[in-house]
Image (spheres, rainbow, N blue to C red):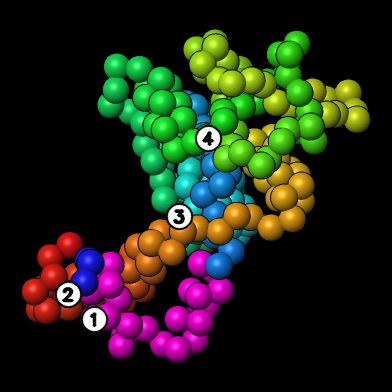
Amino acid sequence: MNESNAIIEVLEAFVSDNKQAHIDRVLKLRTRHLTLVFEDIDKPHNVSAVLRTAECMGIQDLHFIKNKNDYTVNTGITQGAAKWITMHHHCQADDNVGECFDSLRKEGYQIYATSLHETSRSIYDLDPKQKTAIVFGTEADGITEEAGEKADGFVHIPMSGFTESFNLSVSAAICLTVMKSKLGEWPQLQDEEKLDLRAEWYRKIVREADLILKTKGIEV
């Protein structure tokens, strides 16, 4: 029995039937087909709003490149959403942008940076069949030159007014909505990924879960 199975076997007795059914439903709607990347975001409250939106829409992974600016979750805005998603922090490499992008490409992602670059394509024209990572920069300056050079291309949301851009949380919500509508439904997680997440979420739901597991000889 692998570790996730062992954790689930011990903790499921402490998780109500209603909560287990809710987890079943959420796991069926979770995806790693699309992810969002935030490069040196300077307005953390906006990222917290994105985090909440992404979790509500079934996104499992978010990536944070931190060269100059750190990010701390604003729990008042996220309303607990951070508890259910996987946050990847890229802050210890010599080249955090390169490290993040390399890790995404190894997982099969195409990487598009949000920008009004002359070669940028509309989000409505982006093919979502391949796993996709969408990169957002600061609201004032956008992505860095390095991120633009290392991305596979640029993407933007067409504007109908005089203003050139939405704020970060609205932009991310539009990108997620467009991509999901083009796919119909998100591609689901693999069975092993669902198992690992169930074990992780059980540990977060059950009070003193790690102590209970330790009494059963399971160290986590």
Q: Mark 4 highlights which residue?
A: 109
Marks 3 and 1 sit apart, C-alpha to C-alpha, by 23 Å
- Residue 62 lies, in percent from the top left, at 48, 43
Say whether disc 2 or disc 3 marks the residue closer to the N-terminus.
3
**Label annotation for residue 213:** 2
**Label annotation for residue 85:** 3
The answer, for residue 140, to whether it is visible in the render is: no
Q: Which residues are magenta?
A: 4-27
Q: Is residue 138 above or below residue 216?
A: above
Label 4 sits on a secondary structure element that is loop
Question: Mark 1 near mark 4, Cβ–Cβ under 8 Å?
Answer: no
**Within 10 Å of the Cα at label 4, are there few (<14), some (14-19), or many (20+) other Cα atoms?**
many
Marks 1 and 2 sit apart, C-alpha to C-alpha, by 7 Å
Q: Mark 1 highlights which residue?
A: 10
Residue located at (65% from left, 26% from top): 114
Q: Amino acid at mark 3?
A: Ile
Q: Is the N terminus in the top left, top right, bottom left or bottom right quadrant?
A: bottom left
